[in-house]
Amino acid sequence: MAQIVTRIAPSPTGYMHVGTARTALFNWLFARANGGKFLLRIEDTDRERSTPEATEAILQGMTWLGLDWDGEAVSQFAQKDRHAEVAHEMLARGTAYKCFSTQEEIATYRAEQEAAGASYAVFQSPWRDADPATHPDQPFAIRMMAPRTGETVIDDVVQGKVTFRNDQLDDMIVLRSDGTPTYMLAVVVDDHDMGVTHVIRGDDHLSNAARQTMVYEAMGWDIPVWAHIPLIHGPDGKKLSKRHGATAVGDYQAQGYPSAGMRNYLTRLGWAHADAELFTTQQALEMFSLEGIGRSPARLDFKKLESTCGWHIAHGEDAALLHEIEGYLAAAGLPALRDDQRAGLAKALYCVKERAKTFVELIEKAHFVLTSRPIVADEAALKHLDPVSRGILNELTPRLQNVSWTKDALEAFLTEVCATHGIGFGKLAAPLRTALAGKTATPSVYDMMLVIGQDETIARLSDVVG
RNA sequence: GGCCCGUUCGUCUAUCGGUUAGGACACCAGGUUUUCAACCUGGUAAGAGGGGUUCGACUCCCCUACGGGCUGCCA
């Protein structure tokens, strides 16, 4: 088989939807897993609604998710002359015709049909079979001369064979009266020109595939392999919308989800390979196939997303995590790391990454290394600093000077302190935690002492007892 | 209205005519414990409803219900 070529074709009319992100992911996975190409085309033919900001959001979203595309992103609008050329070629081939009906006439036609009892009517242009000699000197739209009998069959990898009766499909407009192409024409021409072999997209396009098939046939072009994947719904099963919270990929980055976890979760949403749940992108590439895609819509489950992300943070490589955390801070509008904080975080990462599901949690747990003296403790943490605890801290702090700074030595020392006071380690760990971090949720006190070092530990303890 | 697609634990899903219907997240109970998280053990929990086909249906067919999509000179 020739090289596989897939594409993602988002329209820049807002933010980048997670559904679009997952579609992009499937296209990317399929192309990369098969040594193919993955292209990006911006469907910006709707000049009214397309914005450069939205295009930027798409590029950023794709980049964040690690979905690299081959070549430059293509602008669909830039191809408008080519689209018009094809429309005119269809005219020449007799597979399309000039339609002089105005939008008002079409509306009137429908109204009449409805008044006559039909609840809905497919518009039948009177110009379809008109003698060119009768053509008025007016603007016209170019309509597809769709077959009126027979059926069009979509052989879809995900949906199976789907049959549409041709009399259900109208003569869609391919070129508007102002000379601009419609979506139905533009996608087909672009996909053909870009050599797209597999069209993997949302199943909201399933019906469109039938119409588009007619364009391919009208031009004598090879029809791509179709794969219409189900849409993503909100937790309540309704179509995902803004009221469900995060719908834009950028939101996910800003909420601290690591991109690897996001990829893993999104891959599993609507796709399965036996019992595989947690996997790296490399493993996903080895397992991925179009056959594993299901046919029913999937709901977003933020708990599972978090759980998946927790695994990826725990298993992530430090350097990569650090880099991504900085990206998260920027996306969330939080202050960037100072050099000392970056260094501290790098040292602390080993003990915070396995206790965080998101970077939000990770930053919280790493507070002890991001803050500096004097440590301001929160209310809950302060409760552990009662007079008795303070007394014990007061006694042990100077002795810390003579403890060698290893986990074993510290453990032996603190265990001994507990023994002499007849208390459990928890009783001592709590106030230590308050002094060291000022919070109740932190890494182990040993890890914190090791990370910040002997001098800083003693200084922080002295602050609270002094 | 017409056409098309879908429906397995709360959620994501496995099963591709014969299983005690499996896994994961969530949840509950217990364990571990230095807070948080993690981890270990166990548990609750599913084939929308109704007809067929078949020796045997979650699986194949039909109907109904529910959900979704398309039905634009939007993409």
Image (spheres, coloured by chain):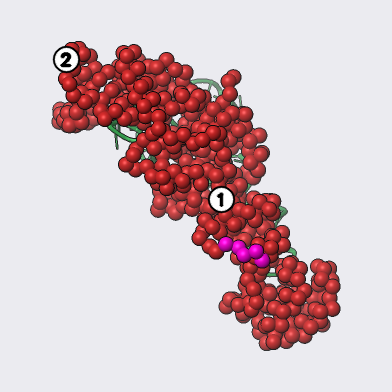
Chain colours: A red, B green
The image position of residue A100, as x and y in percent, is 20, 23
Q: Please tell me whether residue A27 belongs to the stretch shown in magenta.
A: no
Residue underneath mark 2: A134
| Cα separation between marks 1 and 2 | 63 Å
State the residue position of label 1: A305
Magenta part of the protein: which range?
A336-340
Residue closer to the observer: B66 or A85:
A85
Above or below: residue A172 compared with residue A219 = below
In the image, is B67 to the left or to the right of A274? left
Q: Is residue A283 above or below residue A163?
A: below
- Residue A284's place in the image compared with B52, above or below, is below
Measuring 55% from the left and 47% from the top, which residue is drawn there? A64
Of mark 1 and mark 2, the one earlier in the sequence is 2
Which image quarter: residue A276? top right
Image quadrant containing the C terminus of chain A: bottom right
Tell me if residue A338 is in the magenta stretch: yes
Please identify the quadrant where the N terminus of chain A is shown: top right
Q: Which amino acid is tagged 1?
A: Leu
Marks 1 and 2: which is nearer the front?
Answer: 2
Disc 2: which chain?
A
- What's the mark number on residue A341? none
